[in-house]
Amino acid sequence: MDSLGSISVFVQVADTRSFTEAGRLLGVSSSAVGKSIARLEERLAVRLFHRSTRSITLTAEGALYLERCRRILAEVEAAEFELCSAASAPRGKLRISVPQVHGLVMPVLTEFMRLYPDIELDVDLSDRMVDVVEEGFDAVVRTGNPKDSRLMARQLGRFRLVLVATPEYFAAQGVPRTLEDLAGHACLRHTLHATGKLELWPLQRLADGSEPLLPTRFVTTSIEAVHHVVQQGLGIACLPDFMVREAVEQGRLQRVLDEYLEYSGTFWMLWPSSRHAAAKLRVFIDHLCLRLFPVNDGQ
């Protein structure tokens, strides 16, 4: 009885939520996948998936079994890696999720690909709050404070939010000197994927306790789009300092009202604590920690 093979099939189905897609990735037919899952459920005397014509979802027992199976496969992979004669060359597939800040992460990822040609990257570019364990990610990069006890965490770097616009925009519209001055400017805004609400600019309140008035000219779900529009001289944007640092240093963008902003954030690398840190994951974590914020001054 090929227990390990059936476990691999089960994990692939759990990750893809599809017999057909799991079969494609494993190089077998969807019917073979279905039969493997059926035999596994019969042997365990428990149902692992809820099946319908539209979807496949894990049962409570299946979710519990999945966590154990991931540990088993990770340990097998680690054992094989240690015994492999080519152990000096990390290899295999890494499924990761990183924020949609292409200018920050993509150069680091492409550099990693050149350094480790035997590692296949499956990259989810998304700002949504993924479930690292349930969705089968090897590692994710996110902001905020880690709260999931199932995950290991390593700090990658800190950043600040800053207000910027082009010198040409300020020449035409004037440079805001106080928070009240923002009421006379075009504000370029970003909406949060999780809530659909506008991302708040972390500004101090006015003397009367009210929030500054921010006339909105442009709204988008993409922070990269905000970055593009602000560089066209069409308004003021609130963006992470790492995204605008080069343009500010070159004089293409100008920071304003720094003393009125009250926010700094942290990027974290997160990965399942139940998963053995295989060589491919270790080198990936080390690479991002070294390269994502090579100058980590927090400014």
Image (tube, rainbow, N blue to C red):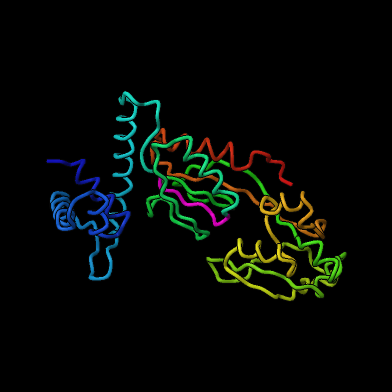
Q: Quadrant of residue 174?
A: bottom right
Q: Residue 118 at x, y = what percent?
A: 38, 36
Predominant secondary structure, magenta span: strand
Q: Which residues are magenta?
A: 94-101
Q: Residue at x 54, y 40 (%)?
A: 288
Q: Of 292 and 43, which appears nearest the observer?
A: 292
- From the viewer's perspective, tell me whether residue 240 is left or right of residue 213: left
Tally of numbered tags = 0
Q: Residue at x 53, y 66 (%)?
A: 193
Q: Of 85 and 271, which appears nearest the observer?
A: 85
Residue 78, above or below 31: above
Q: Quadrant of residue 57?
A: bottom left
Q: Residue 167 at x, y = what percent?
A: 81, 61
Residue 195, above or below 108: below
Say which quadrant the N terminus sits in: top left
Q: Residue 26 at x, y = what percent?
A: 24, 49
Residue 100 is one of the magenta-drawn residues: yes
Q: Residue at x 69, y 69 (%)?
A: 188
Residue 151, above or below 63: above
